[in-house]
Image (cartoon, helix red, strand yellow):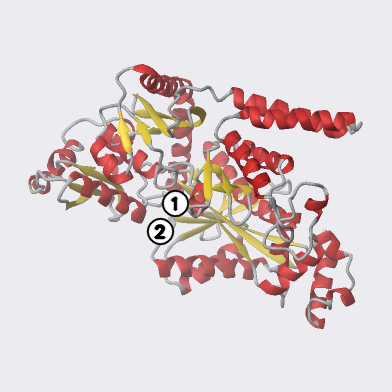
Amino acid sequence: MFREKLALVPNLPGSYQMRNSDGVIIYVGKAKNLHRRISSYFNRTQTGKTAKMVSEITDFTYIVANSELEAFIMEINLIKEFNPKYNILLKDDKSYPYIEYISKPYPRVKVSRYLNIKKKDNKKLFGPYPNAYAARRIVNLLNRIYPLKKCEGKQKELCLYYHIHECLGYCSKKLNQTELEKMEKEILSFLNGNDKVLTNRLEAKMQEYSESLNFEMAMEMKKELEYIKIVMSKQKVELHDLINRDIFGYYFDKGYISIQIFFLRNGKLVGGKSDIFPIVSELEDDLEYYIAEFYSRHEIPKEILTTDNLNHEILENLISTHFLTPTRGPKKKLLEMAILNSKLNLERELELIKKDEYITEAANDELKNLLGLKHLYRIDLFDNSNLFGSFSVSGMVVFKNGRPSKKDYRKFKISMEKNDDYNTMREVIWRRYSRMKQEQSEIPDLILVDGGENQIRACKEILKDLDLKIMVCGLKKNDHHRTNDLVLESLEVIEIDRTSNLFHYLTRMQDEVHRFTINYHRTIRSKGSISSILDNVYGIGGKRKKELIKQYGSVNKMKQATVEELEKILPKEVAKNLYEFLKDFK
């Protein structure tokens, strides 16, 4: 089919793009030799995921590069731009949490995501912590044991933390530099792996509380001591050179690759990450792309241990660190341990993964055929909910290739003051797709709305105004709030077999969008989201919001205030608006 076009492909490095019948890019790859690589898809029998991809290819394009490194960079940029369905997409779009120690102007510790950390000389990072709970608990413990600064900004008066001996009074007291240096030395020593520093402190505190007959606090300290010992016991010291390094091991079998990454920080194994996914191109190419993409959102260590079949020169140029394949000693044992773990993970999970993929893809194909669609890759789902009887919110979730794509999820605060599903849907669809059209971002193959005729009509009206041709269907629930029927664009109602994969697939998607929207409600209701609640009251901007939070601290305390008390901060009409809004808040 491509014989004539393939004959013209040069034997040069570059990036190639596989396209389907609509001209959509479904895979982007790189090659040292474009002719050899592109031909390999069509001159041999393919299996598994590769065979499925090849069956959808109707055309290909390519861009010649000056070097393999340039082709690699081109590949990465094109994947980010077009988000092809068959390329490896990292399952976690968040970086791991780190403990951040800030020394100036005041000593503080906090949990931060790597991508959100601004690099400054007065900050030190410790991690990563694959277990976010462990990172938060350690930070909370350090704040209790050491008198670090805990409040934001500079207060006019000494706060409660100072009076309970959990702060040195940084805002208004002259500080003892010797005491500060000693505290910093102990904290950094602990975060570098010396757990004895903190366990000694905890034992002393426990003894102090026991002697003062404060047995409740003594028991708390005992629990914290036990937790720290458990955490530290899992960090087996493997190397003693204190170099931060990652170990990449993998195992390939039956068209799937299993990756195991170990994180070593200051000689201790602090955690790891594992992934399993199908390979559709050359094993080394997909693995190299995975590594490059992984370090675009995670800390780059001083050294990375990998197998010798990867192109270390290209990876070092792209990631700016040292890649090494150890041949003996403890480093080799670490790499072998990572490879063994990746093998065991694949053997344990492969059948479940293949079964899940088969069921999901079969259900997605069934839905595609039922609706008469040529392709069904991306599905956007919407759910509108009412809060407090007058304020509406909406959630959108996205499924790609039958699986949630959480980085594409969106939340909406609706501007209308009353419950109106029809106009809520119009507003949300307009806001979402007018922006997507303006930004020329990925448009879905299908929109599913949580409801029937009204929601579909509202959605179609806006799409028509935007000149977007996207199929819209509705998911209706029965009296027990469970998925019941599929409503087509023509408003025909299709009853789905309750035992079918398609029914479970639709139910899963509907449950996910409902869960996402409900969690948004809970976030707004939570004490920590007082700021989000105040965003919903007309007349309250950033400055007034800060003053209210400073004065009351929580929604419950604000609810107890009279209009007259609120008027000390807000204009009369705004105070009334807030008072009336809070009356309905539960």
Badges 1 and 2: C-beta atoms under 8 Å apart?
Answer: yes
- Using the rendered image of the protein, determine whether residue 35 is visible from the camera's viewpoint: yes
Seen from the viewer's position, the closer of residues 293 and 264 is 264
Q: Residues within 10 Å of mark 1 (few under 14, many from 20)?
A: many
Question: What residue do we see at 15% from left, 34% from top?
Answer: 43
- Residue under circle 1? 378
Q: Which mark is residue 326?
A: none
Q: Position of residue 563 (x, y in %)?
A: 87, 75
In the picture, the quarter occupied by the C terminus is: bottom right
Question: What residue do we see at 82% from left, 67% from top?
Answer: 582
Q: Position of residue 487 (x, y in %)?
A: 56, 55
Question: What residue do we see at 57% from left, 66% from top?
Answer: 428
Seen from the viewer's position, the closer of residues 85 and 201 is 201
Q: Quadrant of residue 233?
A: top right
- Residue under circle 2? 442
Question: What residue do we see at 43% from left, 44% from top?
Answer: 401
Q: CA distance from mark 1 to mark 2?
A: 9 Å
